[in-house]
């Protein structure tokens, strides 16, 4: 057991369940410093908009409360991610940095810089977990990335189903060292004047518990008729899981396994469940395209 801490870098994976970097950090037996960096520099023009900032505030608040129940503390800092991580690593003499892989072009570039500038000072481990399958895993017969969804979907179905979910740690021990962090309110993520978030606040519950509740409601009340209901605006026929998946409050593997579990006990959900899982793979396909064609947001590939 080492007394040098592991920095657990949270980004779009604000949860405790099915979290590979977290479990790997726990397995070291070292103190863990959960870190979130509010970085408005690295994304460039892809910085968060107002609604995403509001969601992030509440998701971080939920994450901090969940970590506190496990005997830990979320450290929030602001600035360029590489600079913040390097400074924190020196301050606490960290031995390692663990995190989930990112797929957006600016995140991929940031990860390359991490290895280049900090790789000799820290053990850096990157884990999969934000997608069902990695972009490199699905290719055409000629070894090229897919450009069209239907053949991508058919190739996906030939792969093994997502594996078993990873457990949630009961406690993070030993306790993390005392390091300075910002108060969440200092990030000023919520709207002030006017406060337009009354509607979102009444209809959405950011955080891991909210994501799990939304998934349960979807499976119990919506999944059966999803194939038809998703196309009818007057009906609550969609999953409403998109923001929870975006911020990583729930993993796509958790969603997949939950739907498969319902299908296993109710044949009435077969059609709706299959239609929904196809949409979940559409999410993977979007990341697949973005990984192979980073200029896609601005230029046709």
Image (tube, rainbow, N blue to C red):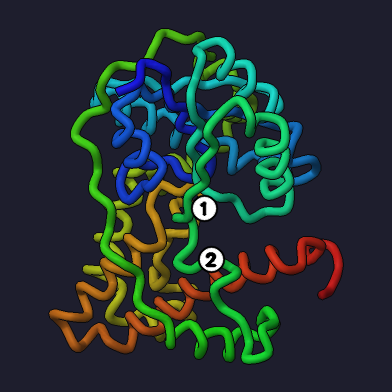
Give above or below for 271 relative to 92.
below
> Is residue 174 toward the left or the right of residue 246 in the image?
left
Instruction: Identify the residue shown where x is 51% and y is 9%.
Output: 180
Instruction: Identify the residue shown where x is 48% and y is 76%.
Output: 279
Give me the disc on residue 246: 1
- Can residue 229 be seen here? The reply is no
Name the spot of residue 136 as percent of width and height, x first: 60, 70
Q: Quadrant of residue 122?
A: top right
**Label 2 to label 1: alpha-carbon separation:** 16 Å
Badge 1 density bin: few <14, some 14–19, many ≥20, Cα 10 Å: some
Name the spot of residue 233 as percent of width and height, x first: 49, 73
Instruction: Identify the residue shown where x is 52% and y is 33%.
Output: 123
Give me the disc on residue 134: 2
Q: Secondary structure at mark 1?
A: helix
> Is residue 69 toward the left or the right of residue 84 in the image?
left
Give above or below for 249 relative to 259.
above
Give above or below for 88 relative to 21.
above
Query: Disc 2, disc 1: CB below 8 Å?
Result: no
Q: Quadrant of residue 260?
A: bottom left
**In this orientation, which residue lies closer to the viewer: 33 or 12?**
33
- Check the picture and name the quadrant holding the N terminus: top left
Query: Closer to the observer: label 2 or label 1?
Result: 2
Name the spot of residue 226 as percent of width and height, x first: 37, 79
Q: Quadrant of residue 261?
A: bottom left
């Amino acid at each position: 057991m080492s007394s040098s801490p592991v920095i657990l870098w949270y980004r779009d994976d604000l949860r405790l369940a099915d979290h590979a970097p977290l479990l790997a950090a726990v397995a070291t037996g070292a103190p863990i410093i959960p870190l979130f960096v509010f970085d408005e520099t690295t994304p460039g023009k892809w910085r968060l908009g107002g609604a995403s900032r509001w969601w992030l505030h509440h998701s971080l608040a939920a994450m901090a409360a969940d970590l506190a129940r496990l005997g830990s503390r979320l450290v929030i800092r602001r600035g360029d991610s590489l600079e913040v991580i390097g400074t924190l690593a020196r301050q606490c003499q960290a031995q390692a940095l663990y995190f989930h892989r990112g797929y957006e072009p600016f995140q991929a570039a940031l990860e390359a810089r991490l290895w280049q500038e900090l790789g000799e000072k820290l053990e850096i481990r990157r884990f999969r977990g934000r997608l069902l399958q990695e972009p490199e895993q699905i290719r055409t017969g000629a070894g090229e990335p897919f450009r069209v969804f239907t053949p991508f979907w058919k190739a996906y179905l030939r792969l093994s189903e997502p594996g078993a979910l990873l457990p949630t740690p009961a406690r993070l021990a030993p306790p993390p060292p005392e390091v300075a962090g910002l108060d969440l309110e200092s990030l000023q993520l919520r709207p002030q004047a006017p406060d337009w978030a009354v509607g979102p606040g009444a209809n959405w519950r950011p955080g891991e518990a909210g994501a799990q509740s939304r998934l349960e409601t979807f499976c119990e009340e919506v999944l059966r008729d999803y194939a038809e209901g998703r196309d009818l605006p007057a009906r609550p026929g969609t999953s409403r899981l998109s923001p929870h998946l975006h911020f990583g409050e729930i993993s796509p593997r958790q969603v997949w396994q939950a739907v498969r579990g319902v299908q296993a006990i109710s044949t009435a959900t077969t059609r709706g469940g299959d239609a929904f899982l196809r949409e979940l793979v559409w999410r993977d396909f979007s990341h697949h395209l973005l990984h192979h064609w980073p200029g896609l947001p601005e230029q046709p590939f």
